[in-house]
Amino acid sequence: MLRLQTNIPHVRQKYNWDCGLACVQMVLKRLFPDSFSDADFEVVCEQQGFGTSVWTIDIANILTYYKADYIFYTETLGVDLGYQDNPFYQDTFDMDEVRVNRLFSSATDLDIKVEKRTITLDEICVHLNKGCVAIVLINNLSLNCNWCGRSLNQLRYLMHRYCGSCNEYDRYMGHYIVICGYDLEKKCFYYKNPSYNIELCCVSFRSFEQAWHCFGTDSDILFVNTENATDHEAYEEHNG
């Protein structure tokens, strides 16, 4: 299979910190098109107690609440103390450290499905072939959309706009996207970016890896199974 794409609703983030929540909403609206409630989702988020600092383990906890079929892969089971001086993390680091470490240590009891492991690009494609989409933590300063044609300077401007705690000189800007397809011939992923109104973006495998395997991300990736939902498109493209 050379190309695959799973259709999911596009949700744009409302604030300068909720990209991860917007990504979860995209996936949940795909899974529960008739029953998902934005109001109920807000209540669930308030109950989690993460405030305006959302970590990937928080997203996994939300997916557990909704009984979604998912798996969370990360390089670090807990909080990396090396992040405490990173401008992106330092304002809420002490509070985040307690909450995040508690979630990791209680993952089994809370039914949070997490494994310490680094995933390859081939494995991402395999999961997509099985009907999954992927919520991924990346460094947005390193991510370029092939279709939008935004330069790095333009991206820095956008990141400054959407993250009040960052400035254009920071080397890391954590951001969540949803990978929903790929093209092996063009060596790219199709993804949803909650900071844009644009329905679909495209990133080369190389640019994606640089943004994903970056200090600050722990190479976090969540695969969510959507195979029981509708509008899953998988097809081959033939030359000539």
Image: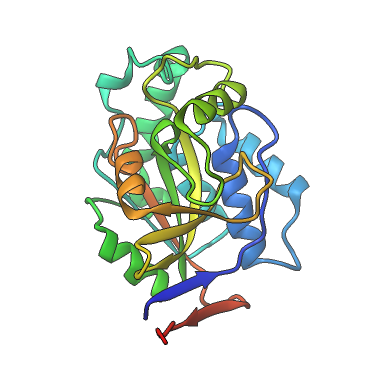
- Please name whichever residue, 84 or 61, is drawn nearer the observer in this view of the structure: 84
- Please name whichever residue, 114 or 7, is drawn nearer the observer in this view of the structure: 7
Q: Is residue 54 visible?
A: yes
Residue found at x 43% / y 31% = 141
Q: Position of residue 80 (x, y in %)?
A: 27, 27
Residue found at x 28% / y 59% = 121
Residue situated furthest front in the rendering: 240
Residue found at x 40% / y 15% = 94
Q: Position of residue 27 (x, y in %)?
A: 58, 58
**In which quadrant of the rendered view does residue 89 lie?**
top left
Q: Is residue 111 visible?
A: no
- Please name whichever residue, 188 or 151, is drawn nearer the observer in this view of the structure: 151
- Number of residue marks: 0
Residue found at x 64% / y 42% = 196
Residue 44's place in the image compared with 191, above or below, is: above
- Please name whichever residue, 159 or 88, is drawn nearer the observer in this view of the structure: 159
Q: How is the image coloured?
A: rainbow
Q: Position of residue 142 (x, y in %)?
A: 38, 35
Q: Quadrant of the N terminus?
A: bottom left
**In which quadrant of the rendered view does residue 238 lie?**
bottom left
Residue 234's place in the image compared with 73, above or below, is: below
Q: Quadrant of the C terminus?
A: bottom left
